[in-house]
Structures are given as C-alpha cells and as structure tokens.
Amino acid sequence: MAKPTNYFDELRGTRVWRSVFRSGTGSSTLHRALAIQQNIFLHLFSTKVRKRMTSFSATWYLGTLTFGTFLILVITGILLMLYYHPSVPQAYADTKDLQFVVSSGLFLRNLHRWSAHAMVFLVFAHMFKVFYRGAYRPPREFNWVIGVILLLVTLLLSYTGYLLPWDQLAFWAITVGSNIASAVPVFGNKVHFLMLGGNQVNANALLRFYVLHCVILPLTAILFIAVHFWRIRKDGGLYAHQSEPKTVAVKAAQATTESAQ
C-alpha cells in the first residue's frame, strides 16, 4: 500500500501544482526563500527562525494567541452578520433571536463576545511583554508604533461592538462614552457629532458603529497586522536579546549614541 507521502509527492509533481507553486520543493535555503517570496501570504514571514525564538519563554505565544482570537472574531462576526440587521426596531429583536431561536446562536454570540475580551487582554499582555523585554528598541521602534496603533484599533473594535445589541446597557454605555468624548477641549463637540451622526444615540449612531465595527476597523486591523508581520521579518525576526545579529546590535548602538549626543 502506497504511503500518503508518496501521493503528495506525485501531486507536487503534476503540472497543475507546478503552475500554482513555481518554486518547487526542497530543504535548502534557496528553495525555502523562493517558496516564501513567491507566496502572497508566506512572504510576510522569515525564511529561517532562530530556534530559541520558538520556545514558549521567548514570547509566551501572546502575539500568536492574539492573532488567533482575531481570526475567531472575524469568522464568528461574519456568521453573526447573517442574522443581524443594523436598524433600531430590529437590532434588539435579532439579538434575542440569536439567544433563543437560532440554533447554537447563543454559543456563537458568546464565543464572539469572550474572544473580544480575550483579544483585548492578550494585546495588552503582548505589549507588556514586548516592553519589558526591550523589543521596542532600534531598529524595531517603527514596529512598536504599529503595535500601539493595533492596540487602539482593538479598543475601538471592542467599543463599537458594544452598541450593536441595542439594549439598555449598550445604549447608556455609549451615551456616557460619547459624552466623555464631547468634553475634549476645542474638538469635543465635533468628535461627539462625528461619532453619533447627530447629537444623541439613535439610528444614525447604530449604523455608524455597525459600519465601523464590521467593515472599516477590521480592514484597518488586517492592513496593520500584515505590516506588523512584515516588519518583524525586515527587522531580523523576533527580538533575541543576547543572540541578536551583529548588524542589528551595531545599528542599535549607533542609534543610542546619536540620541545621547
């Protein structure tokens, strides 16, 4: 009986496979580099990774776990959109239908909700880990800024999703939050009006928060996540402390000297 690996080797030798994956196969550095450079997804990652960086103690896998919760939120969010209407008369009724009528609707909504809480926690934990390990230092300072932007996008995703159930808790929480925003000097009233599409929480606010939560902010997050992964590769991989390449160490020393002068 032929082994599954033999069937896979035959598949990789077919013309259809080679028309999609042109770099071929192999364990050499060249083959690995070509396979990554010619793949729209894999080119964001490094050809080689330091072995110590795959250990749990290096990162606690916080970045990977954060990205995993984001994928769960995207999948569950798309499924929830199939049963939800962003209108004042229907939003609350759809939320109740998800809880009592739709099969596994309560599980789906709770999975989305708790994944959102977990993502906020993991983003904060990931940034604390990066900060205390000193991984924000040159030449990684730009990627640290990208991480801060992703933190803000995560908080905005959590905030905009809070209004969508259109219950009393959501209504008054957004009312309080928007009133706090209106207290900002000079631009407060304009920010308040822009958030709600008016002067009070109504149908306009619900529609704006729905578009932000389901379209604009997720696409923004995907863009910055891609840049985040790409910069990790361009900056020499994950921060390795004492095992950093000499070139990176020299650049960091030069930047420190220039800042001191």
Image (spheres, rainbow, N blue to C red):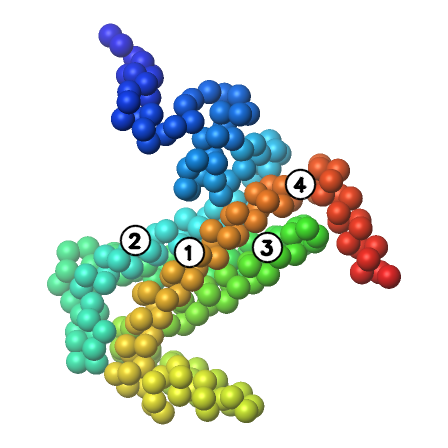
Judged by depth in the image, the label closer to the viewer, 4 or 3, is 3
In the rendered structure, are the residues bearing label 1 and label 3 in contact, judged by CB atoms less than 8 Å apart?
no
Q: Residues within 10 Å of mark 2 (few under 14, many from 20)?
A: few
| Position in image of residue 105 (x %, y %) | 20, 59
Direction from residue 25 to residue 141 in the image, left or right: right
Q: Is residue 57 above or below residue 63?
A: above
Report which residue position mark 4 lands on: 240
Q: Residue at x 17, y 76 (%)?
A: 90
| Position in image of residue 246 (x %, y %) | 75, 38
Q: State how far apart marks 2 and 1 are (Cα).
A: 14 Å
Q: Amino acid at mark 1?
A: Ile
Q: Residues within 10 Å of mark 3 (few under 14, many from 20)?
A: many
Quick one: label 4 or label 3, which is nearer the N terminus?
Answer: 3
- 13 or 198: which is nearer to us? 13
Report which residue position mark 1 lands on: 222
Q: Amino acid at mark 4?
A: Ala
Quick one: label 3 or label 2, which is nearer the N terminus?
Answer: 2
Q: Residue at x 45, y 31 (%)?
A: 35
Q: Amino acid at mark 3?
A: Asn
* Residue 143 marker: 3
Q: Residue furthest top?
A: 1
Report which residue position mark 2 lands on: 75
Q: Amino acid at mark 2?
A: Ile
Q: Regarding mark 2 in the picture, which secondary structure is present there?
A: helix
Q: Residue furthest left?
A: 101
